[in-house]
Image: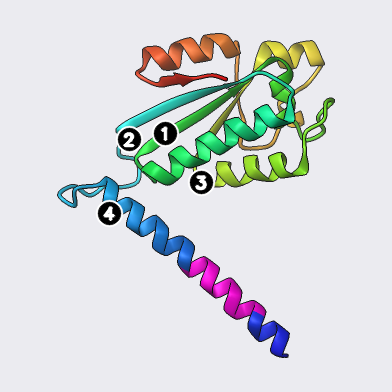
Amino acid sequence: MVSRRRLLTSFTSVVAGFFASRNVSASEETSGDELRFPGDPTEHNVVYQLNKSDPSYHDAILFSAAEMLRKYNDNITIVITAFGPGIHTLGKNPQRFVSNQVKQKIKSMASYGVKFHACGNTMQSLGWEKADLYDFVEVVQVGAADLLELQEEGYSYISW
């Protein structure tokens, strides 16, 4: 009983700290004069290229995207476009190694509104269908064209 109470107290402290830090960040980023409502356009838009199979590369891309999310909260739209060997990070049963930690980060980030795009051409070369990807993944016809088009819409482009 004592260990459950300690666990619950620790968990509550962590959750409270997380929400307190997000509120502080939000107040630092906004002047307080304007309120953002769900569906309002974001001031910041970024697209990441994810096209390698290296686990440290996956970690770097996801860390950077998570830091952007922490800094700008709900005032940023983040898209991660995966193609080539990077597409395996979005597969339910990848044909290349993807760590469980990366899989969990991707699922968590999607729940916070990060968008994941998968290249249809790469999927075709692998014999994959939409059902082979996580449900939250959007399929685009050409991953490189997705990067170009998002930049034309004003997204900042980030690649490693």
Mark 4 or 1 closer to N-term? Answer: 4
Q: Which residues are magenta?
A: 7-16
Question: Residue at position x 52%, y 24% from top?
Answer: 48
| Residue type, numbered disc 1 | Thr
* Left or right: residue 90 compared with residue 37: right
| Residue type, numbered disc 4 | Ser
Residue density around tag 1, few if under 14, some if 14–19, many if 20 or more, within 10 Å: many
Mark 3 or 4 closer to N-term? Answer: 4
- Corner quadrant of residue 76: top left
Secondary element under disc 1, as helix, strand or loop, is strand
* Left or right: residue 39 compared with residue 143: left
Secondary element under disc 4, as helix, strand or loop, is helix
**Mark 4 against mark 1, which lies toward the viewer?**
4
Q: Which mark is residue 112?
A: 3
Q: Is residue 135 above or below residue 10?
A: above
- Corner quadrant of residue 103: top right
Q: Position of residue 5 (x, y in %)?
A: 65, 85
Labelled pair 4, 1 in contact (Cβ < 8 Å): no
Question: Residue at position x 38%, y 28% from top?
Answer: 45
Residue at the spot of label 2: 42
Secondary element under disc 2, as helix, strand or loop, is loop
Labelled pair 2, 4 in contact (Cβ < 8 Å): no
Question: Residue at position x 82%, y 33% from top?
Answer: 93
| Residue type, numbered disc 2 | Thr
Labelled pair 1, 2 in contact (Cβ < 8 Å): yes
Q: Position of residue 61 (x, y in %)?
A: 58, 30
Residue at the spot of label 1: 77
Mark 2 or 4 closer to N-term? Answer: 4
* Left or right: residue 126 compared with residue 59: right
